[in-house]
Amino acid sequence: MLCLEKGFDLENALNSVTDPGLLRAVTEITGSFIAAVDREFAYQIAQGSVRWPATRLLKKLVDTLPEGDRILHILTPNYDMLCEYACDYEDIPYTNGFAGSIERKTNWSAVDCSLRTLERVPYGKRFQRICKQKKHVRIYKVHGSLNYFFHRNAVVENNAWMWDPPDFAPRVMITPGISKYQTLQSYRQELLQSADAAINNASHFLFLGYGFNDSHLEEYIKRKLVTQSCHGLIVTRDLNPRIQALLDQSDNLWLVCRSEGGATEGTSVSNKQYNGSWVLPDAQLWDIGEFTERILGG
């Protein structure tokens, strides 16, 4: 509390918290708050009265996946289920690596088998049926999720517990602070291993509304952007010093954000290889809905 009163952000304020009991209390309070909001939006999204702004973008990206690579990899530090709800509403197959029935465990092999289907494809003058991977989303929730719990010495996924968790199964939600690195190592196989592999295999990156304030999460991503000159696009409302520093180091990283000044909130587009920025005064491309409609035609 003293650190917060001095103006520190929550991440740095929690660096001084190492007591396991206090950390668990922080996790429980955080989980309860997010669960209440998540429950409200879950029903609204299911009825179609509310639409997650990134839903159209998600649908567009999955539909246009090339035949040679039918997987859209999504890495998120968020605990909520918005991405999952959006996939369900749009009938987009998705997985987070967990397989089983009510209480699921990590099993990427089983998941891979479940996401394959027989398709009729041309073969010479005839057709043949071959087993192909469905176009789908793979979600890596690297800081845990509302429906992740530690039970019987394993990380499990249980949707029945996420809004009203039992006392005997603590949430797997990595809260800010220096202790999260130790906690992440405890859950590395379930939360990080597959995400690390996806990052290492990627050559293009799209960042939506991310402020680049997690040094552990960004370690491999920054290496790809800076030292390997991979292509990247950041779409966010506001520029901050962390984003600017990364832009200054990355040849192929572009930024779409809100332009400052003027009577309207336009769009600024920039890249280190060009002087200044390109300003679009009458467009709000930093808004993911408008970006999808005007750039992708979604």
Image (cartoon, rainbow, N blue to C red):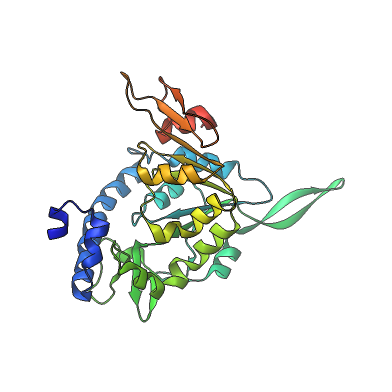
Query: Residue 106 versus residue 8: which sits nearer the camera?
Result: 8
Query: Residue 209 versus residue 253: which sits nearer the camera?
Result: 253
Residue farthest toward the right in the current orientation of the protein: 125
Quadrant housing the N terminus:
bottom left
- Is residue 230 found left or right of 195 in the rendered image? right
| Image position, residue 159 (x, y; %) | 35, 63
Q: Is residue 65 above or below residue 298?
A: below
| Image position, residue 172 (x, y; %) | 33, 68
Instruction: Name the residue: 44% across, 56% down.
Output: 218
Q: Is residue 223 visible?
A: yes
Instruction: Name the residue: 62% across, 51% down.
Output: 70
| Image position, residue 83 (x, y; %) | 41, 50
Q: Is residue 45 above or below residue 19?
A: above
Q: Is residue 1 visible?
A: no
Q: Is residue 90 above or below residue 78?
A: above
Q: Is residue 7 above or below residue 27?
A: above
| Image position, residue 94 (x, y; %) | 50, 55
Instruction: Name the residue: 33% across, 54% down.
Output: 80
